[in-house]
Every structure is written in C-alpha cells, then in structure tokens.
C-alpha cells in the first residue's frame, strides 16, 4: 500500500473539486458558473478561467497539463469551443485530449471540461 499523501480540496458529500496525489493534480469536471443563455464560447472561457484558478490554488498551471477531457452537448459546436481552447492552451505544452458529445447534467450546460496536471 502506498504511503503517498492524498490531498482533497473543496470536498463535498459527492465529490472533491481537486485531488492531489503523488505530484499529480486531478480536477473534477467544470461547467460554467453563469451558463444560462451563454454561448459555447462564453461557457468555455468561463470554465477555463475556473481551471486556471483551481490549478493555481495547488501551485501549478496550464503549462503542466497532462490530459483534458471535454464533453459537448452538441458536437457541432466543436469549432466554437476550440476557438476559446486554442487562445487559452499553452503553446508547446498541449495535453492529450478527448472531446466527445454527451448529454450533460442540465440543459443549460453546453460544455464540461476536466483536466489532469502535474504539480
């Protein structure tokens, strides 16, 4: 059994927003804080800002991304989401990534993003 410390942040009854273990940072799926009536681009920008803040809170940033998973309510909005992603992601430090269409938790959400980063 590993003795590596597990740190959990923003712990709730169902999940933690951030978990750090052995120098790896795992973020839960993030959705826009102000989603209702917002475009896919606006929701993506909101989510990426939240990701920046969460990564900074544990001493890392987007240059240390390892993996990203992106869920879109409608895959036809792929280019719109990428317009924000491409402005945000660190050139030369792009993570592995999967983007899929999925029914999200509430119709107001059009994008959900989850990342894993090195600390």
Image: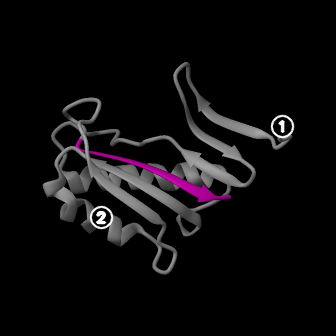
Quarter of the image for the C terminus: give it: bottom right
Residue 82 in which image quadrant: bottom left
Query: First in sequence: mark 1 or mark 2?
Result: 1
Q: Observer-nearest residue: 93 or 97?
A: 97
**Residue 71 % position (x, y):** 31, 47
Magenta stretch: includes residue 5:
no
Q: Observer-nearest residue: 70 or 42?
A: 70
User: What range of the chain is rendered magenta?
Assistant: 110-119
**Residue 116 % position (x, y):** 55, 54
Mark 1 or mark 2, whichever is nearer to me: 1
Q: On screen, 88 above or below 20?
A: below
Q: Is residue 78 left or right of residue 99?
A: left
Residue 31 in which image quadrant: top left
Identity of the residue drawn at 80% across and 41% down: 5
Identity of the residue drawn at 21% across and 60% down: 78
Identity of the residue drawn at 49% across and 53% down: 115
- Magenta highlight: main SS: strand
Q: Which mark is residue 1?
A: 1
Quarter of the image for the N terminus: give it: top right
**Residue 29 % position (x, y):** 43, 42
Circle 2 crowding by C-alpha within 10 Å: few under 14, some 14–19, many from 20: some
Dot 1 falls on a residue whose secondary structure is loop
Q: Which residue is mark 2?
A: 84
Magenta stretch: includes residue 116:
yes
Dot 2 falls on a residue whose secondary structure is helix
**Residue 33 % position (x, y):** 35, 39
């Amino acid at each position: 059994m590993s003795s590596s410390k597990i740190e959990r942040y923003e712990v709730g009854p169902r999940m933690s927003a951030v978990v750090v273990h052995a120098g790896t940072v795992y973020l839960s799926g993030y959705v826009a804080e102000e989603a209702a009536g917002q475009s896919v681009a606006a929701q993506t920008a909101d989510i990426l800002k939240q990701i920046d803040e969460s990564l900074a809170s544990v001493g890392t940033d987007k240059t240390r991304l390892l993996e990203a998973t992106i869920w879109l309510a409608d895959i036809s909005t792929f280019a719109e989401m990428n317009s924000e992603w491409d402005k945000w992601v660190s050139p030369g430090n792009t993570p592995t990534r999967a983007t899929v269409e999925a029914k999200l938790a509430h119709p107001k959400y059009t994008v959900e993003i989850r990342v894993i980063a090195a600390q």
